[in-house]
Amino acid sequence: MRKLAIPLITFLTLALLVGTIGYIVGAGAPAPVAVPVLTSMPTTTPVPTPEPTLVSELSSEPTPTTIPIATPTPTPPPTPASTPEIRQEPASNNVFVHYGEQPPYARTEAGYDRVQLINNENATDPTWQQLKSFLIADKTDEKDYVLGTFMCGAFAEELHNNAEAAGIRAAWVTMDFKGESEGHALNAFYTADGGLVYIDCGGKTGPQAGNTQSVGLASASPEDLRVYGEANSWDKVAYVVGGEELGLVSLDVASCPQYVCYEDYEQKEISFEAALGDYNQKAEDYNSEVAAFNEWVAGKVFVEGTSEAETAHQWSDELRQEKDKLTALAETLDKEGKSLGAFWQPLGVVSRVEIYW
């Protein structure tokens, strides 16, 4: 869904083209002027150094890791004859709320190990900040997702029980997606100042390399999840609305738990991707012009004061100016990308939700 920046451009050192660029030496003749040989442009902020300079090449786009498909239960849960009202999430055609029931879902692929929720009768609803503080301290999200033995249902079970033990009332949630045979499990909390909040603590899987991390979620879709930059944690605010896509935003950058905040985030992400695409196109055009410049100066001897030497100087200056513009734009885009956190693949369009308090 999200296309990361293509591996971009590195600048080669400025160098004298020995034997190809020269000057007629005479009485009072000026010293030779170097003509830069330029190539590519990085997407990360280059470290300013006196020219000539060599800017390290940006690491390539991370190789996505295929995400295993979750199997929350071997048998679908029965639809209750009547659904009790809940003040924070009224029952509707596609939202069903249960109290004091154990979810009829398996926590492992074998099917005999069922989800077991441990409630605390003294647990209370937290504030949004209290919930965030608990999630940051809780380490459930740092566990590995293991297909068949520790999947989304197990993550949600552990986070639920840890929250209740900490005095925070929690719900275990499962949902189905339109057109998908398998669903997803996560958690819900009712915050005193922010209303109902869905949290997906997911889990990590796969190797880590450089400044990028392969991140996995139990998903009804086998599509890959990608991260722009580095994921600080695997706790995510999940945005759940029937008939809408299940959106995910990293907890550390989520502005609020309401779906409107996810829509605002999506617009910022779309804007960022458009700006990134525009940058990539400008960088490609710059590289093409540098190639043309290098081809034109190859094998030539320039005489200072001639029109051809003036053309070489002017073209070189223009390329330097364009390089500086692209460098500044890359810095701006990197800051914006970091402010958006990790980019998480939406998991599908929600068709049914079951909430177990």
Image (cartoon, grey):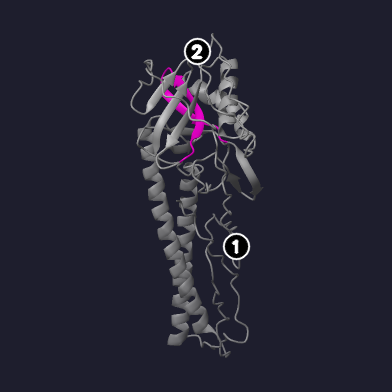
Q: Residue at x 59, y 36 (%)?
A: 203
Whole-percent x, y for residue 72 in the image = 54, 33
Q: Earlier in the sequence, mark 2 or mark 1?
A: 1
Q: Residue at x 49, y 74 (%)?
A: 290
180 above or below 123? below
Left or right side of 276 for 106:
right
- Which residue does the numbered mark 1 point to in the structure image? 55
Front in this rendered view, residue 119 or 77:
77
Front in this rendered view, residue 349 or 1:
349
Q: Main secondary structure of the magenta part?
A: strand
Amino acid at the residue labelled 2 = Thr
Q: Residue at x 49, y 59 (%)?
A: 327
Quadrant hosting residue 202:
top right
Give the residues in magenta. Answer: 181-202
103 above or below 63? above
Circle 2 SS class = loop
Whole-percent x, y for residue 248 in the image = 46, 38
Q: CA distance from mark 2 to mark 1?
A: 54 Å
Local crowd size for mark 2, using a 10 Å CA cut-off: few (<14), some (14–19), many (≥20): some
- Which residue does the numbered mark 2 point to in the structure image? 124
Circle 1 SS class = loop
Q: Are marks 2 and 1 in contact (CB under 8 Å)?
A: no
Amino acid at the residue labelled 1 = Val
Left or right side of 65 for 279:
left
Q: Nearer the viewer, mark 2 or mark 1?
A: 2
Whole-percent x, y for residue 215 in the image = 58, 43
Front in this rendered view, residue 53 or 229:
229
Q: Is residue 234 visible?
A: yes
Q: Residue at x 43, y 55 (%)?
A: 276
